[in-house]
Each structure stands twice: as structure tokens, then as C-alpha cells.
Image (cartoon, rainbow, N blue to C red):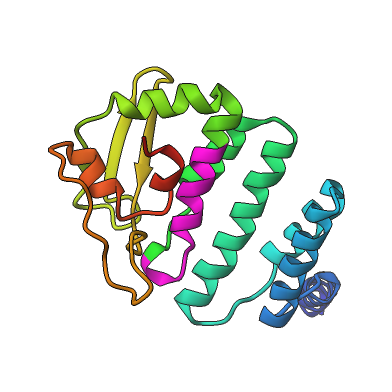
Amino acid sequence: MKLKLVIFFLFFISFFGWSQTEKYDYKDGYNFISKAEKSFKKNKLKKAEEYLVKARNSNYGFCGNSWAGAYSSIELLEAQIANKKKNYDLSLKILDSINGCSYGGYCNRRDVLKIETLFLKHGKNEVINAFKNVTEVNENHDDTNNPYSVFLKEFNYNFNFGGSYSTIYVNNNGEPIEQEQTSNKFIIVARKYKFYKLIEN
């Protein structure tokens, strides 16, 4: 009899705890992300953070692309909030953790935001000059999220980049525009990515 009472008690506690936990589906999750973005634009950072917590607790289904896209949006906004708070190291840490490039993660936006964060932390001219000193690029064959990296010795920072890319130098017909010839391996690779527009000479 005592065993049955114990089992019933444990079941009741478990059920009560489960029923008190809010469950959000993917529609809720995307709605929270949207509300967080609107709050951020209004500089309501605390409210934006509250929505992002709920977005993280949402279920985006069985599709890896949905999870990658949603979490990428969440983390990009978290990094922007950190920048608003002038916590640039935290912002870079968040951005460096974003993955899922081949599954819907916004890695082009991630890399652009990394450059913008470096501008805020070190100054635009200093960052551009640091990239001018880069001629080589390391290839990370085992990392589909960051297939390339360069070390910025001026800031002791390893700038990882890549993943999905789109050719940014195209004409009105969408055809690639021929670029000035260069032997700089970093420039040859970086030209494919949107962040390069921010640092090109």
C-alpha cells in the first residue's frame, strides 16, 4: 500500500511540474524572435532578452534547418544586444559559436556582424589596417561552418569565417564582375563573402 502511495505521489509531482512548464511551438518561437527584434529596435533591451529566452524554449520541430535558422536569429540578436551594452567580448563569443551554415544558419550576417563588432571594439581604421596586413588564409577542411580563418595579431583574435556565401560582385544580370588580379590569398577567398565590403581597400 505504501509503495502505491509513493508511486502516486511521484506521478502527481511529475505531472504537476510538467504541466507548469510552458510549452511553445515553432509559431510561438518565431513570434518571440520577431517581438525581440522590434523591442531591440526600440532600445528595449530587457524586453528583447525576455522574448529571446522564450524563443530559446520553443520547439522548432524535427527539421534541422528550422532549428539552425531560429537559433541563428536568436544568437545574432543576442550579439547585437551585447554590443549595445558595450560588451564586445561577449558579442564576439556569441558570434563565434554560431553554426549551422549549411542548414539555414545566417553565417554571412554572422561574419558581417563580427566585423562591425571589431569596429566598435577597436575602431574602424584600426581593423581595416589589421586586415590589410593579412595575406594568407588558413583552410579548415573539417569545419563546414568556418572553412577559413585568419589571425589578426594586432588584436590577438582569430577571425573565422565562411560557410555559405554569395558572390557580391555581380552586374545587373547577376553575372560576376571581373576583379583586379591579386596574389593575396586572403583577398581571393574573402571577396566571395559579404563582410569583405566592409574592409576592402
**The N terminus lies in which quarter of the figure?**
bottom right
Q: Nearer the viewer, residue 199 or 4?
A: 199
To which quarter of the image does residue 177 belong?
bottom left
Q: Nearer the viewer, residue 13 or 172?
A: 172
Q: Is residue 82 left or right of residue 177?
A: right
How far from the left and from the top, in percent, is residue 48?
A: 80, 55
Magenta highlight on residue 114:
yes
Residue at image location 28% in from the left, 52% down from the top:
143
Q: Nearer the viewer, residue 33 or 129?
A: 129
How far from the left and from the top, in percent, is residue 38?
A: 80, 62
Is 45 rendered above or below residue 31?
above
Residue at image location 56% in from the left, 24% down from the top:
123
**The C terminus lies in which quarter of the figure?**
top left
* Furthest residue in direction top, as rendered: 154
* Furthest residue in direction left, as rendered: 183
Count of marks, rendered view: 0
Q: Is residue 64 left or right of residue 113?
A: left
* Furthest residue in direction front, as rendered: 172
How far from the left and from the top, in percent, is residue 81?
A: 71, 44
Q: Nearer the viewer, residue 67 or 23?
A: 67
Residue at image location 73% in from the left, 38% down from the top:
84
Of helix, strand and loop, which mostly describes the magenta segment? helix
How far from the left and from the top, in percent, is residue 94?
A: 55, 44
Q: Which residues are magenta?
A: 102-116
Residue at image location 45% in from the left, 48% down from the top:
111
To which quarter of the image does residue 56 belong?
bottom right
Is 195 rendered above or below residue 175?
above
Magenta highlight on residue 1:
no
Q: Is residue 126 left or right of residue 85?
A: left
